[in-house]
């Protein structure tokens, strides 16, 4: 499946990359969603820059608005 990943911190146009990844497997109490469109909001932009209060390990997929 395709996913947009932040592979390094920076401005979203520089930090985001389209990548092929394996299909996710949900754990207990989790669900897999098929997302057709997503937006980057301010927290997502800050996550890309590495300046948000949460700092997930690289690489990660932003998308608080899915």
Image (cartoon, rainbow, N blue to C red):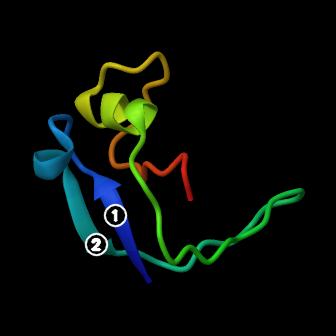
Residue at 44%, 31% in the rendered image: 43
How many residues crowd mark 2 within 10 Å: few (<14), some (14–19), many (20+)?
few
Give the image location of residue 8, x and y in percent: 19, 41
Residue mark closest to the camera, 2 vs 1? 1
User: Would residue 9 appear left or right of 37 to someone viewing this image?
Assistant: left
Q: Earlier in the sequence, mark 2 or mark 1?
A: 1
Q: Nearer the viewer, residue 12 or 24?
A: 12
Residue at 51%, 78% in the rendered image: 36
The residue that mark 2 highlights is 19
Instruction: Please tell me the numbered disc located at residue 4.
Output: 1
Q: Is residue 66 above or below residue 56?
A: below
Give the quarter of the image for residue 46: top left
Q: Find numbered disc 1 in the image and state the secondary structure of the residue it sits on.
A: strand
How many residues crowd mark 1 within 10 Å: few (<14), some (14–19), many (20+)?
some
User: Would residue 17 appear left or right of 58 to someone viewing this image?
Assistant: left
Q: Is residue 27 above or below residue 54?
A: below
User: Would residue 12 appear left or right of 14 to someone viewing this image?
Assistant: right
Quadrant where the N terminus sits is bottom left
Q: Farthest right residue?
A: 29
Give the image location of residue 52, x and y in percent: 40, 21
Q: Is residue 55 above or below residue 17?
A: above
Residue at 74%, 67% in the rendered image: 26
Q: Find numbered disc 2 in the image and state the secondary structure of the residue it sits on.
A: strand
Do the CB atoms of the residues marked 2 and 1 lie less than 8 Å apart?
yes
Give the image location of residue 7, x and y in percent: 24, 49
Instruction: Please tell me the numbered disc located at residue 44.
Output: none
Q: Farthest left residue?
A: 14
């Amino acid at each position: 499946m395709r996913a947009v990943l932040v592979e390094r911190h920076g401005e979203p146009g520089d930090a985001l990359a389209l990548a092929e990844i394996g299909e996710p497997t949900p754990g207990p109490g989790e669900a897999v969603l098929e997302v057709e469109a997503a937006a980057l909001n301010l927290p997502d932009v800050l996550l890309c820059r590495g300046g948000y209060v949460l700092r997930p390990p690289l690489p990660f997929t932003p998308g608080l608005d899915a």
